[in-house]
Amino acid sequence: GEDVEQSLFLSVREGDSSVINCTYTDSSSTYLYWYKQEPGAGLQLLTYIFSNMDMKQDQRLTVLLNKKDKHLSLRIADTQTGDSAIYFCAETDTGGFKTIFGAGTRLFVKA
Amino acid sequence: ETGVTQSPTHLIKTRGQQVTLRCSSQSGHNTVSWYQQALGQGPQFIFQYYREEENGRGNFPPRFSGLQFPNYSSELNVNALELDDSALYLCASSLAARLAVTYNEQFFGPGTRLTVL
């Protein structure tokens, strides 16, 4: 079945890079996403990558996709305290009707 | 262009009761999807409505139902509430129904936190 897995916690120092990893099972996923959720808030789309791409860069964010290993990563350069949040990896399922989310990685940024 | 709004923000119900949650989609968006996010978990897809008809459903029982109206508003109804229904309920609107055909961003509302006692 469809599943998205990610590590639950990551702690980094302010100014360092953060790398959040994710694996997914649906090899026919067309789009893969990274969402950010701050306490008490809904989901904010950070970035997405189309399945025929290997990498996408957007300011401090770099997404790497290894389709062979079904592995997705999000790198945040120069991590700031304001980046502290839960980050969700997600994919669009084969039918294209729903988005499947991982359980989220809680990022702690230490000043 | 206004964003996606949801009401109420918080709600407390008791087991066995019924609840209606509301969502106002972004103007022009024909599709609304509802998700349940239990504490410490990622959102789980409940169902999607496209032009007022259910267009896809996740692994949720029939006591979860929905309505979509022509004015871009929608409802999620849950009957016979159970303790495990306690969660953050998110709605998301998008232009088109099939998310994988072309890039079609979903815009999420802030959610309604439902507590079932």
Image (spheres, grey):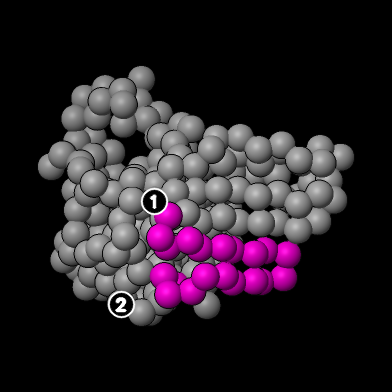
Based on the picture, tell me whether residue A52 belongs to the magenta stretch: yes
- Find disc 1 in the rendering and name its residue: A24
The quarter of the picture where the C terminus of chain A appears is top right
Q: Position of residue A41 (x, y in %)?
A: 57, 48
Q: Is residue B96 above or below residue A27?
A: below
Q: For label 2, count other residues whose C-alpha is less than 10 Å away and answer few (under 14), some (14-19) or many (20+).
A: some
Q: Position of residue A104 (x, y in %)?
A: 51, 42
Q: Which residue is mark 2?
A: B101
Horizontal arrangement in the rendering, residue A73 relative to residue B50 (left or right): right
Quarter of the image for residue B12 reads: top left
Q: Secondary structure at mark 2?
A: loop
The residue depicted at 67 percent of the width and 63 percent of the height is A61
Tell me which residue sits at (37%, 30%) in the image.
Answer: B86
Going 31% across and 56% down the picture, which residue do you hit?
A26
Q: Are marks 1 and 2 on the same chain?
A: no
Check disc 2 and give the amino acid type.
Val
Q: Is residue A106 visible?
A: yes
Q: In the image, B70: left or right of A40? A: left
Callout 1 amino acid = Tyr
- Nearest the viewer among B44 and A58 is A58
| Cβ atoms under marks 1 and 2 closer than 8 Å | no
* Residue drawn at 46 percent across, 32 percent down: B39
Secondary structure state at the residue bearing disc 1? strand
Find residue A57 and report its horizontal and vertical position in percent.
Answer: 64, 71
User: Which numbered circle lies on residue B9?
Assistant: none
The magenta stretch is: A50-69
Residue in front for this viewpoint, B94 or B110: B94
Q: What distance separates the C-alpha of mark 1 from that of mark 2?
A: 19 Å
The answer to whether residue B27 is left or right of residue B65 is: right
